[in-house]
């Protein structure tokens, strides 16, 4: 069935370092890949997304890359700050559907 | 001017009770969703409505019944609550098959 694997489950980095979170999806019909940040006690907030016709997208310190052949996509955060600490979720949405399949989440800790 | 709002934020109740969670969005979106997030943070879709019609109905016990009185509202009613229903429930909305925007969540605790 449809599945999204996300790694690592936890990630600790020093402030100012980069963080990379990786996801692999199983449904080759997926064509939309959003990333969400969830802070403690809050709902997931969209931080960046990418569509299958694009290989890379950047927004300030955040970038996402997509490799359709390998069915991999990754989130890159540069110059991490303590306020980046949160749980991050990737998701994949099969073409023509309303459905998101979420990854299992990565708890990122940025150490000051 | 909250985009997706849910009430209540916290809900503590006894096993066997019936409870409802309400969701409203002021984004003008056509599609609304209910998700369940368990203690391990797994986010799983439960239901989705598009223009008041049910379009996604995952394998959810029929004790859970969604209701969409209009495009801007999607409520979740749960009958005969069980311990395993304890979780955080999120409502979300989207403009069709596109980016979903989540509410702040309702933490349900069943004692």
Image: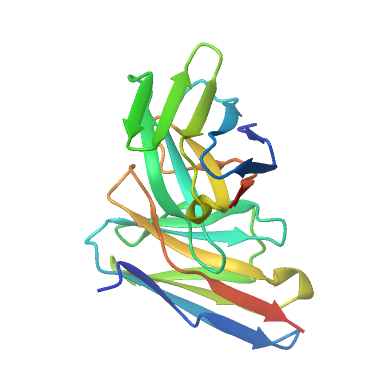
Q: Is residue B28 left or right of residue B42?
A: left
Provide residue A107's location: percent of width, then percent of height: 64, 49
Nearer to us in this view, A51 or B20: A51
Dividing the picture into quadrants, the one containing residue B13 is: bottom right
Q: Quadrant of the N terminus of chain A?
A: top right
Asked if B14 appears above or below B43 in the picture, the reply is: below
How many dots with numbers? 0
Q: Give percent across and percent down for residue A28.
A: 51, 20
**Whole-percent x and y of residue B19?**
58, 84
**Residue B61's image quarter?**
bottom right
Please tell me which residue is depicted at 66% across the width and 86% down the height of the picture. Answer: B12
| B23 in relation to A8, above or below | below
Residue B74 left/right relative to A80: left
Where residue A64 sits in the image (x, y, percent)?
43, 29
Residue A16 as seen in the image, left or right of residue B4: right
Q: Is residue A71 visible?
A: yes
Residue B18 in view, yes or no: no
Task: Tell me which residue sits at (63%, 77%) in the image.
Answer: B108
Note whether B25 is above or below A104 in the view shown.
below
Closer to the camera in the image, A52 or A96? A52
Which residue is painted at 41% across and 38% down in the image? A97
Q: Is residue A71 left or right of residue A57?
A: right
Q: State which quadrant residue B98 falls in.
A: top left
Seen from this angle, which residue lies furthest top? A69
**Is residue A31 shown above or below A79?**
above
Q: How is the image coloured?
A: rainbow
């Amino acid at each position: 069935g449809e599945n999204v694997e996300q790694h690592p489950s936890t990630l600790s980095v020093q402030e100012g370092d980069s963080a990379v979170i990786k996801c692999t999806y199983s449904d080759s019909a997926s064509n939309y890949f959003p990333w969400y940040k969830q802070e403690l006690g809050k709902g997931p907030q969209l931080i960046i997304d990418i569509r299958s016709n694009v290989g890379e997208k950047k927004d300030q310190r955040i970038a996402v890359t997509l490799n359709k052949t390998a069915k991999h996509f990754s989130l890159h955060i540069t110059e991490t700050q303590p306020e980046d600490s949160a749980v991050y979720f990737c998701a994949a949405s099969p073409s023509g559907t309303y459905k998101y399949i979420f990854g299992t989440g990565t708890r990122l800790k940025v150490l000051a | 001017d909250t985009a997706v709002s849910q009430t209540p934020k916290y809900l503590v109740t006894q096993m066997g009770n019936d409870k409802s969670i309400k969701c409203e969005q002021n984004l003008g979106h056509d599609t609304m969703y209910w998700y369940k997030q368990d203690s391990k943070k797994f986010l799983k879709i439960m239901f989705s409505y598009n223009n008041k019609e049910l379009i996604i109905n995952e394998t959810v016990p029929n004790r859970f019944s969604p209701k969409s009185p209009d495009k801007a509202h999607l409520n979740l009613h749960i009958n005969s609550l069980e311990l395993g229903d304890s979780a955080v429930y999120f409502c979300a909305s989207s403009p069709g098959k596109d980016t979903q925007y989540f509410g702040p969540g309702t933490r349900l605790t069943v004692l």
